[in-house]
Each structure stands twice: as C-alpha cells, then as structure tokens.
Image (spheres, helix red, strand yellow):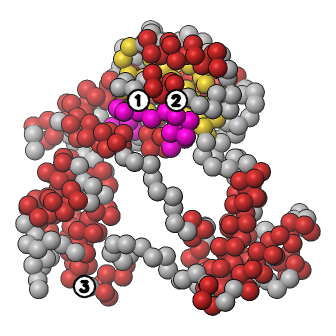
Amino acid sequence: MTDAQETAADSPLRTTGGAPPDDGGTSDTGTPVPLLEPREGIPPVIASPEGLAEVVAAFAAGSGPVAVDAERASGYRYGQRAYLVQLRRQGAGTALIDPVGCPDLSALGKALTGVEWVLHAATQDLPCLREIGMVPTRLFDTELAGRLAGFPRVGLGAMVENVLGFVLEKGHSAVDWSTRPLPEPWLRYAALDVELLVDLRDALEKELDRQGKLDWALQEFDAIASAPPPEPRKDPWRRTSGMHKVRRRRQLAVVRELWETRDRIARRRDVSPGKVLPDAAIVQAALAVPVNVHALAALNGFGHRTGRRQLEQWQAAVDRARALPETALPQQGQHVTGPPPPRAWADKDPVAAQRLSAARAAVSALAERLNLPQENLVAPDTVRRLCWEPPKPADEASVGAALAGYGARPWQVELATPSLVAALAGAGAQTP
C-alpha cells in the first residue's frame, strides 16, 4: 500500500471556494452557499430537429468533459425511458433536451464520441440514454468516485455540498417528468444538476489522486463504459414485493398470471404497473386463490373502487392459473447458477461456511484500512463464488485468476488476493 493510500482514512476533502458561480463556494463563515440559478439562466427546452442540430454543433465544438444527466418518470410511467436529458460543456453551456420531441439523440451521442462524460450514478442513467442513442466511450462517475474516496454520503446534493460548498435544491427528484410542459422550477432544478458536475469531477480526481486511488477509479469507469447492455431478467414476476409469503406452486402461478396481465395493461396505457394493481394485491390474490369475482372483490386491493370489468380481467388471470395442470405450474425456487444462499451453507457445507466467514472478515478489515465500501473492494457475489468452490491449490496465482474470471478489476485482484488467500488457508480451504 502506498503512502497516499495509508492516508485514505483521513477526512475527504472539502473545498472552501473556487467553484462556480464566480462568487465562490462556501461563504466566509463556512456556511454552504445555496445554488439557486444556473449561471446563464434556464435554457430553453429543445424539442425540434432544428434545435437539436444546433445543440449537436455547439457541443461538438465545446471543450473538455461533458456533464450528462437524465430524468425519468419512475412510479408514473411504464419503463425507465428518459423524459429530459441535461448536458453541460465548456464553450457550449447547458442544454435541456426533450426526448419526447427528439426521440433519437444518436447524432449527439456520435458528436460526443471520445469525449469523457461525467455522470452521477452512471449505471442508473445509462440504460435510458442508450435507448435514445447516447452511449459514452469514456466516463467519470462522481458517485462511484465518492465511494472510492471514502465519502460517507454520496448523493449528488451531499457531494456538491461537502466538496464544493454549494447547496443544491433537490425537491423535484421524484416528480412526474413526463409532464408537459415542464414547470420552470423543475427546469431550473434540472439545469442545476449538471451545473457543477464537471467541477465536482475535477475536485474528486484530485482527491482520488491524493489517496492513491485514481487508477482504481479509472479502471472502474472503463468497466462501466465497456459493459454490454444487461440481459433481460428471467421470470421478472418473481420480484413481486411480498413473494416470500407465497409458498405453493399454484399460488406462484396466480402471481405470474396477474403480474403478466398487469404488465400488458401497464405497457399499453404507459403507466407504472403499481398504479394498475399494487404488488400487495397480487400477493393477496395468490394466497387466497379466489374462485369468483365476488371472492376477489373481498380482498385488499380489489375493493369498491375496482370496476366490474377490471375485476373480471383479474379473475380471468386467476382462473387461468387455477386451470393449469400440475406439470405447467412454476417451480418453487428460481433456477440460479452459482452457490446457494449463504444462510444454507452451514447445513450444506460447513467448511465452505467457515471459508465465507473468514473471507468476509478479511475483506471487511482491508476495506476499512483503505477507507472504501466492502462491495467496491470485492463484489459480495465474487466472494461467495470463490468460497463455495475455491481453486486448488488456493494460492495467489489461482485465487487471483479466479477473481479476474468473476469480473474483478486488476486493482481489486492485486489488493484483495493476499487477504483472501490467507482467509481461505486459515479456514481450511485445502481440506480434502
């Protein structure tokens, strides 16, 4: 570990000014300064091909990294599409783009190829940006940078306040961004979200370099930028909230039929599935398996506000589940690859359970010394897989190769391998 890494447990930086607006950051009394207006005012929302072409030209001619953010309508609309895209770059200023009016932003994405994109919690926004043709080739994630630097709070507002000394107003983060026209206070909030992202990026880069962690962060950013789109989730209905109460296969079939019916309706109406039928109502129906509309209407979630036609469509889904032959019913547990849940290890393989306990303790101790979250040092799933089927011999070469095979980055392999080898050996990893 380098001298810089030895000092990583020191308090993360907090600047006392020097960030825009031009009048500085933290006040003379040390009180964070509210950031109330974008420095060039609220830009117009771009919703036409002509306006988009001007933005593409301006941002292609800009310099330095580009701050990027996107607003979705989670909880209001079906899916996770973007309803507003915000960008800021030196020489181009800030742009607010309406993906409803401009659904194809691939020309903008192409113009920014090779430019570093600065995002906060990049993995949350990249899927919806990819849908409209915006895919970065390089990025800097300020949330992940904050985690690696040891900040206890890594939300954008907390980071801007702690690092740059400004207070961002965050009152509109959960509004319905599909609303048209978008109210001016929402647009102000959206513009301010990218106002200081590049400044935050620059400050965090310096802090990571001070701690000897900058190369770690760059490896993480490269991994995010080069990751392929995630595979569609298998059996998404199994993620219905409250599924742990559903024990029987016939009841599972009711959940599946109701979930899939709800999903079709929500997609057609473009509303959040929870607004069509709550998860709690699905689980109630699955536990009861009602035999008719009257019995269904007596359940929580299917009360007097549910119309007769709606009740009939939900009961039809229940009836389809009731009519299925035993061979067509879903299995109790979802088939998964890899080790079983850790709670079952003590019974299935006590030696593996000892290995996991020792490895977790080793990762925890190392992460504490490096002042970063355990999950960022080594993914918990990687630790489980390594402990369930450790390589033989469990030496540094084999363990390092196993970690890399599970997707660990070189910096993680280098740092974690010695501790994990010692933990496996101490827990009897070599036991026949």
Which quarter of the image is occupied by the C terminus?
Answer: bottom left
Mark positioned earlier in the residue sequence (3 or 2): 2
Tell me which numbered mark, 1 or 3, is placed earlier along the sequence. Answer: 1
Q: Nearer the viewer, mark 3 or mark 2?
A: 2
Which residue is tagged 3?
350
Q: Residue flagged by tag 2: what amino acid is it?
A: Ser
The total of numbered circles placed on residues is: 3
Identified at 20% across, 82% down, the residue is 351
On residue 106, the disc is: 2
Mark 3 and mark 2: span between their CA atoms? 53 Å
Residue 392: x, y in percent?
A: 11, 74
- Whether label 1 touches label 3, CB < 8 Å: no
Taking the spot 29% from the left edge, 34% from the top edge, the residue there is 12
Q: Report helix, strand or loop for mark 1.
A: strand
User: In the rendered structure, which disc, 2 or 1, sits on the residue that comes first in sequence?
Assistant: 2
Q: Residue furthest bottom?
A: 326
Residue in the picture at 45% in, 76% down: 335
Q: Nearer the viewer, mark 1 or mark 3?
A: 1
Q: Quick check: 416 above or below 42?
A: below
Q: Nearer the viewer, residue 178 or 350?
A: 178
The magenta stretch spans residue 130: yes
Circle 1 residue: 118
Q: Is residue 123 left or right of residue 324?
A: left
Residue 150 in view of the camera: no
Q: What's drawn in magenta, residue-wise? A: 127-151
Residue drawn at point x = 21 percent, y = 36 percent: 215
Instruction: Identify the amino acid type marked 1.
Output: Val
Find numbered disc 2 in the image and state the secondary structure of the residue it sits on: helix
Specify few, some or many for label 3: CA neighbours under 10 Å numbering under 14, 14-19, or 20 or more: few
Mark 2 neighbour density, 10 Å: few (under 14) some (14–19) many (20 or more): some
**Location of residue 41 with respect to 269 vertically, above or below:** above
